[in-house]
Image (cartoon, helix red, strand yellow):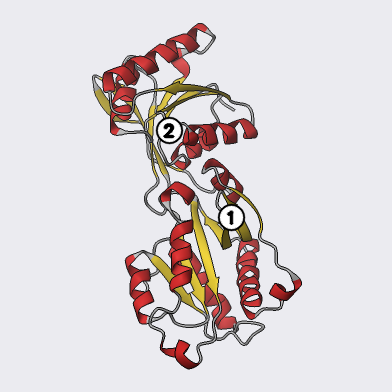
Amino acid sequence: MSNIAMICLVGDQPVPNLLPFLHYRPARMLLVHTERVAPAANLAAVVKKLGGCEVEFCSVPPYRIAEATEAIEGKIGELVENGWRTDELMFNLTGGTKAMVLAGYQVANRHLGCPLIYVESERNFSYCYEYQIEGGRLTPQGEAIELTSLLNIDLYLSVMGVTYKPHGFNDSQKRQDGTIFQNEVAVVLEQAKADGLLGDVLPSQDLMPGHIDADVIVLLGNKLGVIEVKHKKLVGKDANNITHGSAGINQLMTLAEPRYLGTYAVRIYVGNCPLGPTTAEVARARGVYHIQLSSWDGTQFSADDREKLVREVIAAMQGKKVNP
């Protein structure tokens, strides 16, 4: 735990604000938010659950720079009167609107010597860049800090405001081919976690709000992947169905909406059959990774397909897999 008092600009995606908290472990945080208070509230709930950090809030107009600047400065002044120290301030300018970032920068410019940080999270890894304002210019302070292995699935879902519970199968469902196939996929991926190849694995959950079924959720680094698992016997007219698999793709798109699981959630479809040609085109267009495990015999995969599943899930999570 440090003595840092971190000023965070909170937008719709709170994960980039949670990562530096987990790295720096500040003693105090000021969450600057708009009238959309839910992301800041979710972040505050996680921070308070982890403990050891005082959390304060500051509401600002999203697009009026001068008013936002004065609101942040006024709140800092109030907090200083209550024991915060200006020489312990750190400004995290990652989130919020562009106007909020400009306001945050202007406030930081009034507290020269305080570090500013920015978290890059769009690529496959998360990096924190630290700066100071010197002579009216931002000066980098050292090399970028890689923020690795800070999250687990529970933290990720919690900061997104998503709760979950085991889906549960009745006795009849447990005997169905699709359930057996799904469970075996989860077993293979849980072994990959045990082997240190994946950071976290959570099978068969109902996510709330919405009671949306997530077959398998995985975490690698700080990136979340949601996996839809489908088993199908393509016989008769189904063998020529050009839209086979479309229901699973639509389910993935619902799960991976930015407002639900975040902007950078990875979408993966695992099945024992090829997608219909139309569905395959839709999957490519929507950035869904497709993994086909053709060796399934009703009870298990071949050793090659077990390795393929782990290898291609990791590749998808790293942005390396290219759909055929």
Left or right: 58 with respect to 307? left
Residue 6: percent from left, percent from top: 47, 25
Q: Nearer the viewer, residue 49 or 125?
A: 49
Q: Which residue is mark 2?
A: 36
Left or right: 221 with respect to 10? right
Residue 199: percent from left, percent from top: 57, 56
Q: Residue at x 65, y 70 (%)?
A: 187
Q: Is residue 177 above or below residue 119?
A: below
Q: Residue furthest right?
A: 171
Q: Nearer the viewer, residue 36 or 69?
A: 36
Q: Which residue is mark 1?
A: 211
Q: Nearer the viewer, residue 318 or 143?
A: 318
Left or right: 207 with respect to 174? left
Residue 59: percent from left, percent from top: 42, 23
Q: Is residue 90 above or below residue 43?
A: above
Q: Which mark is residue 98?
A: none
Q: Residue at x 32, y 14 (%)?
A: 110
Of the 4 image quadrants, the one containing the C terminus is: bottom left
Name the image quarter holding residue 278: bottom left
Q: Say if residue 125 shows up in the picture.
A: no
> Count the marks: how many?
2
| Amino acid type assigned to the residue bearing label 2 in the image | Arg
Residue 248: percent from left, percent from top: 48, 70
Earlier-in-chain disc, 2 versus 1: 2
Q: Secondary structure at mark 1?
A: loop
Q: Residue at x 63, y 27 (%)?
A: 52
| Amino acid type assigned to the residue bearing label 1 in the image | His
Q: Nearer the viewer, residue 122 or 197?
A: 122
